[in-house]
Image: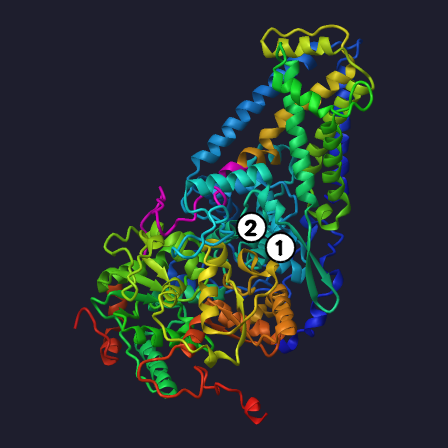
Amino acid sequence: MSLEHLPKPEELVKEDVLTPPESPWMDTPTVFKPGTYSFPTAAKNLKYLGMPNPREWSPTDKDWKLPDNWKEIVLDGIRERLLKYRSFRVFMDICVRCGACADKCHFYIGSGDPKNMPVLRAELLRSVYRKDFTALGKIFGQLAGARELTYDVIKEWFYYFYQCTECRRCSVFCPYGIDTAEITMMGRELLHLLGLGINWAMEPVANCYRTGNHLGIPPHGLIDMWEFMVDDIEDITGVKVGLPVNKKGAEILFVTPSGDYFADPGTYTCMGYLMLFHELGLDYTWSTYASEGGNFGLFTSHEMIKRLNAKIYAEAKRLGVKYIIGGECGHMWRVMHQYMDTMNGPADFLEEPVSPITGTKFENCKTTKMVHITEFTSDLIKHGKLKLDKSRNDKTITTFHDSCNPARAAGILEEPRYILRNVVDNFHEMPENTIREQTFCCAGGAGLGNDENIEMRMRGGFPRGNAVRHVVDKHQVNRLTCMCAIDRATLSALCEYWAPDVTVGGIHELVANAMIMTGEHERTVDLRGEPLIPEEDEDV
Amino acid sequence: MNAWSSLFASLFAVIGLVIIALLGVAPAVGLGTLFGVVIPYVAIAVFVIGIVVRILQWAKAPVPFRIPTTCGQAKSLPWIKADNLESPYNIWGVIGRMFLEVVLFRSLFRNTRAEVADGAVVRYASAKWLWLGGILFHYSLLTIVVRHIRFFVEPIPSFVALLSSADGFFEILVPTIFLTDIAFVLAASYLFFRRVFIPHMRYISLANDYFPLFLILGIGITGILMRNVWKVDLLAVKELAMGLFSFHPTVPPGIGSIFFVHLFLVSVLLAYFPFSKLLHAPGVFLSPTRNMANNNRMVRHINPWNYPVKVHTYEEYENDFREKMKEAGIPVEKE
C-alpha cells in the first residue's frame, strides 16, 4: 500500500468519525481491512529467535494454525503475568471506565474505531481476565463484563494490540495512571506465546540479534555507510572527521539507532554526531556489535528487551569505556532509561559520567551511566563550548515534535528545546495539547511503521499532522524537528500526507549545520547538500 | 449485551434489592434481625476481608520495572528546572504527586475533548466537567460518611457536629437538608447521565458501571427520604447502629422500613466493593506509573525475578563476521 491509494487527507477523517457504531463491541467482529494491519512474522525470524510456533500464515486466513492448546497457553500466560507484574494486576482491577482516555488516543481520533479507545483496548483483555480470574465474572458472565476467550478474541487482540503504539498518552490523562502501553505489552507477549506477531517488528528483532542492529547491516557494511558520511562531511565542510570504530580504551561508547546510518533524513543527524564529536576532539567510539540503540524487543516481550539490550553493557565492558552516550531515539530511550540497568545492570564496571569538555557531572545518570545526547550537547552550549552560527539555519522554520518515550517515560523536554533555540532563529511550538507530555505519536512506533499499515498510520497520524498544519499556516513552518529515528522515518510519510512541504529532521543535523568547525571552508550547502540560502531568495 | 440492557439489568437489580429489603422487614415476614444485624455484619466482614485480600494480592505482585509516566521535566542538568510534582525525582515529589492525584484528581483535571470537524480538522476543548463531577461526588460522599459517625458514637465528636452544622448552614426546610446530600445526588446523577447521553460513554459502559451508580444513588435517595420525607426514629437508628458497633446488636422496634432499605443497599455496596471497579480507591495508591520516582538513571531498580536470558554474545558475533571485519579494518579479538 502507498499514500496514493488513500483518499485525500481532508476526506480521510470525517466530522462524524467519533460516532460509535450500533453493535456492542463484544458482538462486533474484527475485519482485517487492507491498509490497517501489519503482515505476520515470517517463520524464519521466529525460528532464528527460538520463539514458538513458526509458520507461514495470514491474518485474513480463517485458520491461524494455532497450537491445539492455545487457550490453555494464553490463560496460563495471563496467570503468570498477573503474578509477575503489579501494574498488570492493578490495571486489570481498577479501571472505572470514566472515559477520560478515550479521545486521547491518536488511533481513536483518526479511525473512530471504538476499540481504539484505550479503555476498550484494555477491556479486550480485561473481559477475559474477568471471566477466568474474578469471582463475579465467573458467576455473572457478560453481566459482569466478562467474556469467553475464543478464537475470535485472539484475532481481535492481534488486530488491536497492533493498533497501539505504546505511546502512553492515555496514561497521562488516566486518573489512576493506567498505562495502555503496559496492557498492550502484555497482550503482545500473550500473542507471541502462540506465534502471533508482526514481521515489521520481528524481522528487526531477528536482525538485531544476529548483526547487532535492526536493519541487519553487517560490520563491514556499517563501515561503508559511515565512511560515506565522512566523505560527504568533507565535501560540505572541508574537514575530514575521524571515525573511531570498536576502539578499545575509548572514554565513551556512542550508541544510536541504526535508522540513522541507513536512510535520509536520519543520516544527516548521524553526520551531525560525527561532526560534533570530531570538533570536540572527543575520545569516543562507535561499535559494530552495539550498533543499535533501538530495541524492538520493547514491542515484543520483556524477555526480548533484555536479550537485545544485553549487548550495550557487554560492549561497553569489552571496550573498556568509562560511560555511554546515546543518540536521538524515542523508544530506545525508554529502554535505556527505564529497563536497561534493571535488566542488564549493574554497570559497576563503568564510571559516573563526566563531560570531558565542560567537567559537568551528569548526576542524573550515576547508576545507568548513560547520557542522552541532548543532555550532553545542551551542557556544551550552556558552557559556551560550541561556536554556533544560527544564520546557517535561517531557511529552516522549525517546530519540535516531542517523541512519546523521551517525553512520557523519561521527562526529557527542555534539553532539546534549549539546543534548538541556540541553533535556529525560527522555532515555533505546536499547540500545547499536542506537545511535551501531551505530545501525539507519529503513529508508526511500536512496530507499526510499515507500508502495509499505511491507512492506519495516516489515521493515527492525523492529530500530529493537524498540529503541524496549524504551525505551517501560522508561522510558515517548513521543518519538523524530532529526536527519534522512527519519527524521522514515519513522520516523513505523515508530513507528505498531512502537511506537504514540511521536511523532517533531527536536532543534531541542525546543530552541525550551525556549528563552526575548526579549519572548515566556507559552507554553501547544508548537510543535505542543499544551498544554505535558497536559490529563489537569491533571485529576489 | 448492549448499553441499554446493561443499564436496565442494573436498574432492575437495584430495584430488586429494594423490594427484597421491603419484603424482608415487612411485619408479616419480620426479618428485622437479618437485615438489621446479620447482613450488615456479613457485609462488613466481606468488605474488610475482601479489601485486605485484594491489597495483599496487589502488594505481593512485584514491580519488576520502574515505569512512571512522566508529565514534566525530569531532573537532569542543574540549570534546567526540574518538575518534582509531574516528574518526581525523590520521595517528596512522589508524595506530592500522589497527594495531587488522590486529593485533587490532578490527572482528570487535564481532561480535554477532541472535536473533529469536516475537512479533517481536530480541536481540543477544555473538558473539566468530569473533574468537577468527580470531585463533588467523592467529597460529598466523604462528608456524608463522616457525618454518619454521629450514629455510632456517643457523645458526638465535636468535628462531626461542626461538619454537620456547616453542611446544613443554609437551613433549607426542616429538618435541614444537607448541602452535601444535594451535591451528592446531583453529582452521581451527572455521572450517570454522562454515561447515557455521551455516545462513546454509553458504548463503553458495562453493567459494572451502572450497578454501583444505581446502588449509591439508591443509598443517597433513601437517606434523604428517611430524613426529610418518611422520617424515621433517629434515636432508634442510633441505638441499632451503636449496638452493631459495640457488638451488642439489637433491633429496636419502630424503625421505618425505608431505613432497612438504606442499610441493605449500603450492605450490598460494601460486600460488592472488593469485587468491583470500586477498588480504584485503594488501587490508585498502588499504580506504578504514578507512585514511582522518575529517578531511573540515578538509583538502580531491582527486579526480584530477573532471570538470565539467551543472548548473542560478542564472541558469537565476531565468529559470524571475523573475516569481513578484518577486511574492513575493524579490530577483532581473535585473529
Residue bearing mark 1: A104
Q: Which residues are magenta?
A: B284-310
The image shows residue A162, relative to residue A6, as above or below, that is: above
Queried whether the magenta region covers residue A324, the answer comes back as: no
Chain under numbered label 2: A
Q: Name the residue rendered at 75%, 60% in the picture.
A: A16
Q: Is residue A359 left or right of residue A415?
A: left
Instruction: From the viewer's side, name the closer residue of A462 and B94.
Output: B94
Amino acid beneath label 1? Lys
- How does the figure colour the protein chain or chains? rainbow
Principal secondary structure, stretch drawn in magenta: loop
| Lower position in the chain sequence, tag 1 or tag 2 | 1
> Is the C-beta separation of discs 1 and 2 under 8 Å?
yes
Amino acid beneath label 2? Val
Residues at marks 1 and 2 on the same chain: yes
Position of the C terminus of chain B by quadrant: bottom left
Instruction: From the viewer's side, name the closer residue of A285 and A476.
Output: A476
Residue bearing mark 2: A172
Relative image position of residue B264 (x, y in whole percent): 70, 20
Instruction: From the viewer's side, name the closer residue of A450 and A405.
Output: A405
- Local secondary structure at mark 2: helix
Queried whether the magenta region covers residue B291, the answer comes back as: yes
Mark 1 to mark 2: distance in Å?
9 Å
Q: Name the residue rendered at 45%, 75% in the picture.
A: A510
Chain under numbered label 1: A
